[in-house]
Amino acid sequence: MRLSRPAFVLIVLSLLALVSIACFMTLGAKGNWSFVISFRGKKLASLLLVAYAVAVSTVLFQTVTNNRILTPSIMGFDALYVLIKTGVVFFLGVGALTSIDSQMQFGLEVLVMVAFSGLLFRWLFLGEERSLHLLVLVGIVFGILFRSLSQFMQRMLDPGAFNVLQDTFFASFATTDPTLLAISAIIVGLVTIVALRMLHSFDVLSLGRAHAINLGVDYRRTVVIILILVSILVAVSTALVGPITFFGLLVATLAHSLIGNSRHHYVLPAAVLLAVVCLVGGQTLLERVFEFDTALSIIIEFLGGIVFIALVLRRAAR
């Protein structure tokens, strides 16, 4: 029996993801295996959770905006995260970053980011009929405002505090609180249950607003629910490891190219598997093979930025 292209791609990506996970857990492991499994297992869990959240949120955001060069970060989530961290150091001092309970910080950051997106959606969607593109534009404006406020406060910090603060602006998978992992997994699991119940409407939404309405989809209600799910996934992944701007764009673009069509029951798992291969495989290469002392997120952001520029140039050439 001949496999279809999407099925073949998913099988290959699944094998690559399993190899990446196996190499990450075993390559270079010495000593007590119970310690190795526990230590690497926590890091692996955070990588898998972030890979899943970023991939799913980006694919769904591109579906509702009907634009494949957008990512949820364009709504200002990353800038808001940086503003929260900067505000804590500016008003409470650099010691507050380590002295405040990590669970409290996580809860505060998730609540602020989800509340911000909720207010934005309520203002732009639940009142008069407004364009989805206006929502994206307002998100960009808020992102610029948050970055400007952050830069203003950062210029007034002493160099030592700024160096400590700057380390929090890059995504890190080195150490993650197991309690936060469990809380994040529960939240992501609940979001997944809701998303699975709406899976049938994703393909219809990707056809555009007019086609979706003509085919019987409650467009406004469905889009608002998806945007809230996207906001929760982005807020959880950002609060857990830090901001990742272009990673979602990278895996979503590759998933669409490899699958060859827009059907979400193929594209979503392909994007998740690609994200797992990139994060787990990339972290394995950096830590065990090349022994680079650098953050994986910097390399991924660099590659994602190149993909973003290539997509913009390709659209401009049409």
Image (cartoon, rainbow, N blue to C red):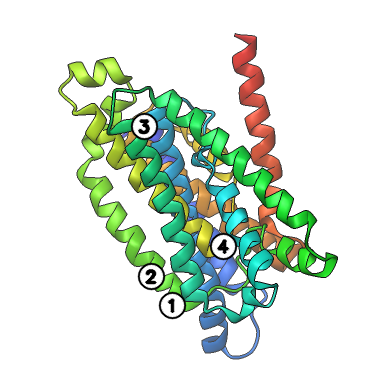
Measured along the vertical axis of the image, is residue 92 above or below residue 12?
below
Query: Which x, y percent locates residue 8?
Result: 41, 38
* Circles 4 and 3 in contact, beta carbons < 8 Å: no
Looking at the image, the residue that sits furthest to the left is 216
Alpha carbon distance from label 4 to label 3 = 30 Å
Viewer-nearest of discs 2 and 3 = 3
- Residue flagged by tag 4: what amino acid is it? Val
Quadrant (top left/top right/bottom left/bottom right) for the N terminus: top left
* Circles 1 and 2 in contact, beta carbons < 8 Å: yes
Name the residue that disc number 2 marks.
183
Position of 168 with respect to 59 (left or right) is: right
Sequence-first disc among 1 and 4: 1
Q: Secondary structure at mark 3?
A: helix
Viewer-nearest of discs 1 and 3 = 3
* Circles 2 and 3 in contact, beta carbons < 8 Å: no
Crowding at dot 1, Cα within 10 Å, few <14 / some 14-19 / many 20+, comes out as few
299 or 163: nearer the viewer: 163
Name the residue that disc number 3 marks.
124
Crowding at dot 3, Cα within 10 Å, few <14 / some 14-19 / many 20+, comes out as some
Position of 251 with respect to 144 (left or right) is: left
166 or 269: nearer the viewer: 166
Crowding at dot 4, Cα within 10 Å, few <14 / some 14-19 / many 20+, comes out as many
Query: Which x, y percent locates residue 251?
Result: 53, 41
Query: Which x, y percent locates residue 148?
Result: 68, 44
- Residue flagged by tag 1: what amino acid is it? Thr
Name the residue that disc number 4 marks.
241
Sequence-first disc among 1 and 3: 3
- Residue flagged by tag 2: what amino acid is it? Ile
